[in-house]
Image (cartoon, rainbow, N blue to C red):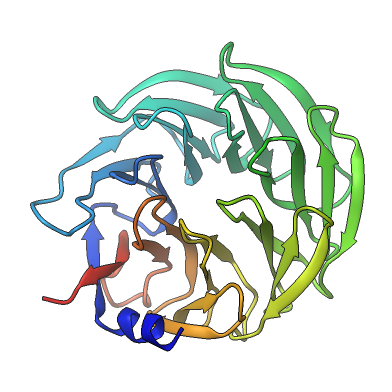
């Protein structure tokens, strides 16, 4: 445990700049070789990242949206298909090799959340009006639409695709059966709104980040809370498990990204940052953590940047 903690200390972050305005979302493809970033500047970008930090990074701009690209996700079965959700009421699918949009699906509201089912067949999209749409990716057609009478924040499937989770503004997590979307459990998870959710890649746990500044860890098998992570002091905006399920990263308006050991609950490293964070995501094959946030302030040009932590210090 101590050795692991020390090994993080020899690692550094690299900065990637291409967007004109702040980056809202970062996500890795299933091979961990490409990273997509979505920005307030109405574009997404694809970055070819060597996991060892060698070579010049090439990036491709994905143009077509007419509003902020708030979230994006990769096809879990295809390393070159990425989906973007934007405020322009559309979801777009892109070929990451050419940068071309292959499908454009018009929906009813301003989209803020998007996630793939683990088998790659369905996509769930959440909008600002608390409406959930499930798209069949094989036909690009909505197969479910449901409007909720409470604030719905982040959404996720478990690793088998049998459970579907919603985090809500009421401090609850709704656990639904899939595909029926029947409510199985309403978890009184936090004392304030639940903002974000992450699924352990090994399928054992899910974690929830809340406005009460806590991250809670839950067992998928019996839906019980195992522990909480208490390092942050501001509402938790974004969380992610690393590929082995050993570590969890969480971030907020605190000026650091916390990395904690999942089993012990102890913080093992903190990555300093200069602004509130919007998105953290671990690479699915390597201990590389992408993170993106707001600009430093109005007078310093740190807009449009994201960083990746985990490279060997040279």
Q: Quadrant of the C terminus?
A: bottom left
In the picture shown, does residue 124 fall above or below 95? Answer: below
Q: Nearer the viewer, residue 160 or 291?
A: 160
Residue located 91% across and 44% down the image? 184
Residue 299 visible within the image = yes
Percent position of residue 23, x then y: 40, 56
Q: Nearer the viewer, residue 279 or 88?
A: 279
Percent position of residue 2, x then y: 42, 88
In the picture shown, does residue 236 fall above or below 43? Answer: below
Residue 255 visible within the image = no
Q: Is residue 144 left or right of residue 309?
A: right
In the picture shown, does residue 155 fall above or below 84? Answer: below
Q: Nearer the viewer, residue 69 or 113?
A: 113
Percent position of residue 153, x then y: 71, 53
Q: Nearer the viewer, residue 149 or 138?
A: 138
Q: Is residue 39 left or right of residue 167?
A: left
Q: Quadrant of residue 176?
A: top right
Percent position of residue 222, x then y: 84, 56
Q: Is residue 228 left or right of residue 65?
A: right
Residue located 15% across and 50% down the image? 57
Residue located 81% across and 72% down the image? 190
Numbered marks: total = 0
């Amino acid at each position: 445990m101590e050795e692991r903690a020390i090994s993080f200390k020899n690692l550094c972050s690299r900065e990637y700049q291409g967007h004109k305005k702040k980056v809202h979302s970062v996500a890795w493809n299933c091979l961990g070789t490409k990273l997509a970033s979505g920005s307030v500047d109405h574009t997404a970008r694809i970055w070819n990242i060597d996991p060892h930090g060698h070579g010049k990074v090439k990036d491709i701009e994905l143009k077509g949206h007419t509003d902020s690209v708030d979230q994006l996700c990769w096809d879990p079965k295809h390393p070159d298909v990425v989906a973007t959700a934007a405020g322009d009421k559309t979801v777009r699918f892109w070929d990451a090799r050419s940068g071309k949009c292959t499908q454009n699906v018009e929906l009813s509201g301003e989209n803020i959340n998007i996630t793939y089912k683990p088998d790659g067949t369905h996509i769930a999209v959440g909008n600002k009006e608390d409406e959930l749409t499930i798209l069949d990716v094989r036909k690009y057609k909505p197969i479910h639409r449901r409007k909720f009478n409470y604030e719905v924040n982040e959404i996720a499937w478990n690793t088998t695709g049998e459970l579907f989770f919603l985090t809500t503004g009421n401090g609850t997590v709704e656990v639904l059966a899939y595909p029926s979307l029947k409510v199985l459990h309403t978890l009184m998870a936090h004392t304030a709104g639940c903002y974000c959710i992450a699924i352990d890649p090994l399928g054992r746990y899910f974690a929830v980040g809340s406005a009460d500044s806590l991250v809670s860890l839950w067992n998928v098998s019996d839906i019980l809370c195992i522990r909480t992570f208490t390092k942050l002091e501001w509402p938790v905006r974004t969380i992610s498990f690393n590929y082995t399920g050993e570590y969890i990263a969480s971030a907020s308006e605190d000026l650091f990204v916390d990395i904690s050991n999942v089993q012990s609950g102890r913080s093992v490293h903190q990555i300093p940052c200069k602004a509130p964070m919007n998105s953290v995501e671990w690479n699915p094959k390597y201990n590389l953590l992408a993170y993106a946030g707001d600009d430093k302030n109005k007078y310093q040009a740190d807009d449009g940047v994201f960083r990746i932590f985990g490279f060997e210090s040279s």
